[in-house]
Image (cartoon, helix red, strand yellow):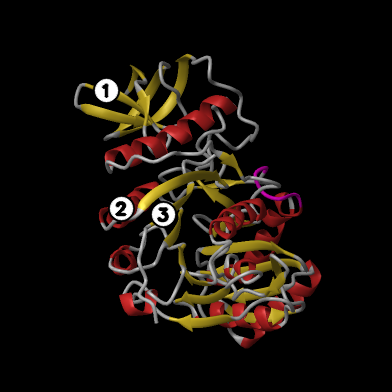
Amino acid sequence: MAEQVTIKRLGAKADGVAEGASGPVFVPKVLPGETVTIERDGAHARLVSVDTASPERETPFCPYFDACGGCATQHMKHGFYQAWKQETLVHTLRQARIEAPIDPLIDAHGDGRRRVTLHVRFPDRAMHVGYMEARSHQIVEIAFCPIAETTLKEQAPGIARAIGEHLKGARKPLDIQITTTQTGFDVDVRGHGPLKDKDCLSLIDLAARLDLSRLSIHGDVIVERRPPAILMGRAAVVPPAGSFLQATRLGEETLAGLVTEACERSKRVADLFAGSGPFSLRLAAKSEVHAVEYDQGSMAALDKAFRATPGLRRISTEARDLFRRPLLTPELNAFDAVVLDPPRAGAEAQVKQLALSKVPLVVSVSCDAATFARDAAILIGSGYRLERVVPVDQFKHSPHLEVVGILRKDVVKKRR
């Protein structure tokens, strides 16, 4: 049943919050002060119409915005959007009782997302290719994605559809990750499972017709026609298929710039949760680096890129699960700085060891403000000062935000 409500505020996920008779109700793609008609589904609602619009509302630039679950904020004017993102970080830190200077939001969207994941589903006799609706498994079919890089924007749906056609016999749900690299598209397909030899041969032919650099299934390479290289500083890295990558080129450059600036006087740096080396390979221009990451393939890619790039200081690598086996205090004390860039869950176990250490500088990079605040609070409680917090918006048009925090502690090191 339809009902009319007034939006009071925005939540952390960009949903509008209205007060209903049975409690708060969350409405997507609305703004504070708007009167809207909704259809409830428990605590969530579907937007039927905007009856009284906010002056901060603008027309979304993507024709799929109303249906697609990928973007959440295209209806916000730019100034309002930036202020809202900044305020969500301020609020999160305040809740954790953290006071620190916060820089203005940095727009790091650049040319757009360099990786997209399209879904192929077979709910009926037809094949459907696109993104999913918000809070749904229904597919919104798209012809292009305007927030992706130019080369990816219009070609990605066609690539996903061509691969889906080749694998539709099994009628399994497929997730097709497509990444732009220096040598073309790197494609990893998830959901199908092991392939028969004839299917592999068919996909090899398809990769040639589509001029893909690399095609893999669940990270297992089917064919690599050209090494799909990613530039990280002066180094060219070929990451493992489907491995982690910062969302935009400018986002990576911005985060790495903040990290290297903070560590410019550090002789020996530990880069923890290092991935394939976006920070390590830039830090090594001035510092000796020890890179630690769970994924052995990422460590191998980093090591290979380091050895092929002249002029860098030594980078040592270690494949290690930092959630189960964090670096211990005696290991940490060998470094002048530690860089952390954990997954969304944060780095609580590692941070507890850092809190006991004599490391004078910690640079914390996080894609989740709440876990950033939790981990920073642990370090602050052990004597670190949070000197600077920088919000970096590489996930533009979404509620997600990158945060860089610089923490220092005065330590007295024993003379040898």
User: Residue shown at 38%/74% (left/top)?
Assistant: 332
Residue 148 on the magenta segment? yes
* Disc nearest the viewer among 1 and 3: 3
Q: In this image, 296 relative to 324: left or right?
A: right
**Inter-mark Cα distance, 3 to 2:** 8 Å
Determine the image quadrant of residue 79: top right
Task: Give the SS element for disc 2.
Answer: helix
Q: Which residue is under mark 2?
A: 380
Q: Which residue occupies the foreground of this view, 76 or 339?
A: 339
Q: Which residue occupies the foreground of this view, 36 or 306?
A: 306
What amino acid does circle 3 point to?
A: Leu
Q: Which residue is under mark 3?
A: 407
Classify the position of the C terminus by image quarter. Answer: bottom left
Residue, far front: 415
Specify which label sits upstream in the sequence, 1 or 2. 1
Q: Residues within 10 Å of mark 3 (few under 14, many from 20)?
A: many
What amino acid does circle 2 point to?
A: Ile
User: Residue shown at 54%/61% (left/top)?
Assistant: 263
**Inter-mark Cα distance, 1 to 2:** 37 Å
Classify the position of the N terminus by image quarter. Answer: top left
User: Residue shown at 59%/85% (left/top)?
Assistant: 196
Q: Which residues are magenta?
A: 146-150
Residue, far bottom: 197
Q: Which residue occupies the foreground of this view, 168 or 34?
A: 34
Q: Is residue 68 above or below residue 191?
A: above
CB within 8 Å, label 1 to label 3? no
Q: Is residue 341 visible?
A: yes
Could you say where residue 357 lies in the image, as x and y percent from the top left?
Answer: 32, 69
Determine which of the numbered discs, if any, sits on residue 19 in the image.
1
Specify which label sits upstream in the sequence, 1 or 3. 1
